[in-house]
Amino acid sequence: MSSASALRAPTVQASPPPAREQALRPEVNEAHVRFIGLGKTYAGQAQPALQGIDLNIRRGEIFGIIGRSGAGKSSLLRTINRLEQPTQGRVLIDQVDIAPFDEDRLVELRRRIGMIFQHFNLMSAKTVWQNVELPLKVAGVAKAERQRKVRELLELVGLAEKHHVYPAQLSGGQKQRVGIARALVHDPEILLCDEATSALDPETTASILELLRDINQRLGLTVVLITHEMAVIRDICHRVVVLERGEVVEQGEVWQVFGSPHHEVTRTLLAPLQAKLPAALQASLRSNPASRDAAVVLKLVALGELELSGLFKDLGGQVSLLQGGVETIGERALGRLILAVRGSVHQPHQLLERARRWADDVEVLGYVG
Ligand SMILES: Nc1ncnc2c1ncn2[C@@H]1O[C@H](COP(=O)(O)OP(=O)(O)OP(=O)(O)O)[C@@H](O)[C@H]1O
């Protein structure tokens, strides 16, 4: 994209990357946005909102940021376009430190980084067309070019027919489409999404996610999004980071983090997406076997294919499927099973060991019977 060179060229001269960064590993060099030792403490606050963040966001990926309320998600996102100023560390965009940017460079940076919001932030007294056109006017773009651009973007977001209406006459999803069109007027290379689908119903959310995915693929945009909806991360993100008290506690490919979450916070956040035992069974689950006939209840997660006949044979005894299914995350299959194994000759730790030959993550949930 032409905007990348506009960002990169002049700043490299103004602020060359230190020698340490020139010897980076190749995959680090792919970073589009890079946080180095990033910290933020708000004035008057004892606790930092962000601390020690070292993170790369790759060019062209859809990157999710999750965490509990107050974990620092918005603070982190807003350092990318310097709506928040870090108090420690650096943010590099295309290897360029954005901290020394003066006002002019900041305006240029913010044109290269589009942003959409939960409540759309549209101007109610302006039509759809005028809302999208306004940032182009402010930037001094000539009328013919403005018209071409607004027409093209309203086509892209599927709102060409609604160009003359006011925001109050639009549905939530349509308002967000206007927000997206407006965010794209300067051909940005990065799109920041702050809870962009949180005010929308599931069906509208799906259509906005489809649009974001389409934009990501067609325009090659790097998309960074915050959401409290784990299904959004599952459905469109390539990688995800989990923040807790301003620190990174887990990060990775979505299918790996969702398939095998390591941190307690990640497990809690993902709980709504996990397979659940039927309530009656959950109630009868014990932490110790009540008799020699008790069944061990195992939860298994397999990243990729799970060979059931081999697993069942290896576990021995009578294996019942209590819950299970395969979902697709990205292009990966993720299998989740909850099994009851009765009458196995193996002790629980042996069962676990055997199950781990077949699945990536295995847990004993308890005993029934
Ligand atoms: N302008 C501010 N002044 C002082 N403290 C702030 C400010 N903005 C955020 N904070 C504090 O910084 C911490 C991180 O806030 P942030 O909004 O980044 O978290 P978040 O993960 O986005 O939360 P949420 O999911 O609730 O939106 C919180 O403790 C918050 O109270």
Image (tube, rainbow, N blue to C red):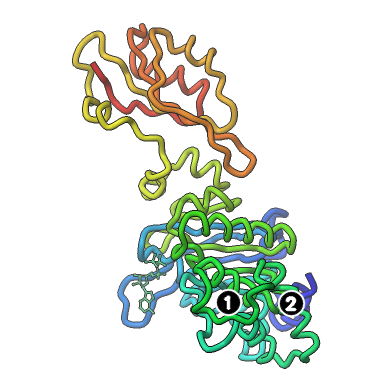
Residue at image coords 58%, 53%: 237
Dot placed on the residue nearer the N-terminal end, 2 or 1: 1
The type of residue carrying mark 1 is Asn
The type of residue carrying mark 2 is Arg
What residue is disc 2 on?
151
Residue at image coords 49%, 43%: 258
Tell me residue 100's x, y (percent).
61, 84
- Is 290 located above or below residue 112 in the figure? above
Task: State left or right for residue 229 relative to residue 187.
Answer: left
The answer to which quarter of the image holds residue 103 is: bottom right
What residue is disc 1 on?
81
- State the CA–CA distance, disc 2 to disc 1: 27 Å
The answer to which quarter of the image holds residue 346 is: top left
- Circles 2 and 1 in contact, beta carbons < 8 Å: no
Tell me residue 9's x, y (percent).
78, 78
Task: State left or right for residue 297 relative to residue 115.
Answer: left
Crowding at dot 1, Cα within 10 Å, few <14 / some 14-19 / many 20+, comes out as many
Task: State left or right for residue 312 relative to residue 113.
Answer: left
Q: In this view of the protein, which residue sits in the foreground, 368 or 82?
A: 368
